[in-house]
Image (cartoon, grey):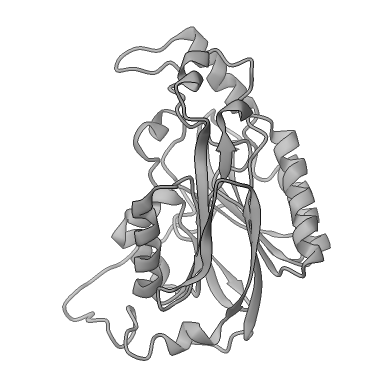
Amino acid sequence: MKDLKPTCKIAVVQAAPIMFDKAACTEKAVSLIQECALKNAELIVFPELFIPGYPYGMTFGFSVGRRTEEGRKDWMLYYRNSILVPGEETKLLGEAAKKAHAWVSIGVSERDAVTATLYNSNLVFSPDGELVFCHRKLKPTGSERVVWGDADKAYFPVAETPWGPMGSMICWESYMPLARMALYQKGITLYLSPNTNDNEEWQATIRHIAIEGHCFFINCDMYFTRDMYPKGLCCQEEIGRLPQTVCRGGSCIVDPYGHLLTEPVWDREAVIYAELDMDQAAASKMEFDVCGHYARPDAFVFQAAENSDWE
């Protein structure tokens, strides 16, 4: 393992998006990046689909063999507020990252520039404002598949940071053991997990992954409520059946030993600040290194698909 910068000042942003409004979401993200910069954050992490929000509970009129015109109208609103990568929104986010002198990770609904397919994607910007990678979610979960397509590129990209390689898995991608292994093989020290997953079982999962990969697990969830959905949606009955608090959050940071470095934050917007001791990434591997001395390549053979280019 290469020498790492000894500490990483991180900001985990548990915030509510401005639902279905890409311009307002981008403006809020830029403002939050500026706020984190005032606290000297070097790495700023946003949740899954922060632009333009996660359409939790919506069916978009889909049922087996059937669609509705009302659902198609709601989908078109979401489509129009999904963003091109690169595009105007990524330009603004890159400028904010450069001004903050920080690495920035943010989840977006990406609209393909050629087809009409949407992708659940995670963007990472460097402190010079460069869009380093765009990772598309490998497999949308459950009914997400009627909204977003499977990743067709950028399967396991990583960013080479001063704190070691940094990669991301979006929400339930982290339940795919071989996807985790693909990141471990690249030596990640920072495992970013933008997600919309506020259940109890997830809290057990993130601690397991941190100790399995002996890496820092950055659990970044969002908080939003039922009254944040746009009032003009056609699916008001679906929205009305949701609990008042749709997603409770639970964002936190887990160290490479599987211990909570910060406690989960519930039921509110918050920015979690912490300083990561990067020596732990190497020290924790003394007795277990999943791709090193504890590996058995003579007994197990694994090779990830080489499809990391996103441009």
- Residue 59 percent across, percent down from the top left: 43, 22
Count of marks placed on residues: 0
- Residue 31 percent across, percent down from the top left: 79, 49
276 or 282, which lies in front?
276
Q: Residue at x 53, y 15 (%)?
A: 236
Quadrant in the rendering for residue 125: bottom right
296 or 266, which lies in front?
266
* Apparent side of residue 179 relative to residue 152 in the rendered image (left or right): left
Q: Is residue 235 visible?
A: no
> Farthest left residue?
299
155 or 106, which lies in front?
106
- Residue 192 percent across, percent down from the top left: 52, 61
Quadrant in the rendering for residue 299: bottom left
Asked if 81 appears above or below 47 in the picture, the reply is above
Q: Residue at x 75, y 61 (%)?
A: 36
* Apparent side of residue 46 relative to residue 191 in the rendered image (left or right): right
- Residue 182 percent across, percent down from the top left: 37, 66
Q: Is residue 210 visible?
A: yes
Asked if 26 appears above or below 193 in the picture, the reply is above
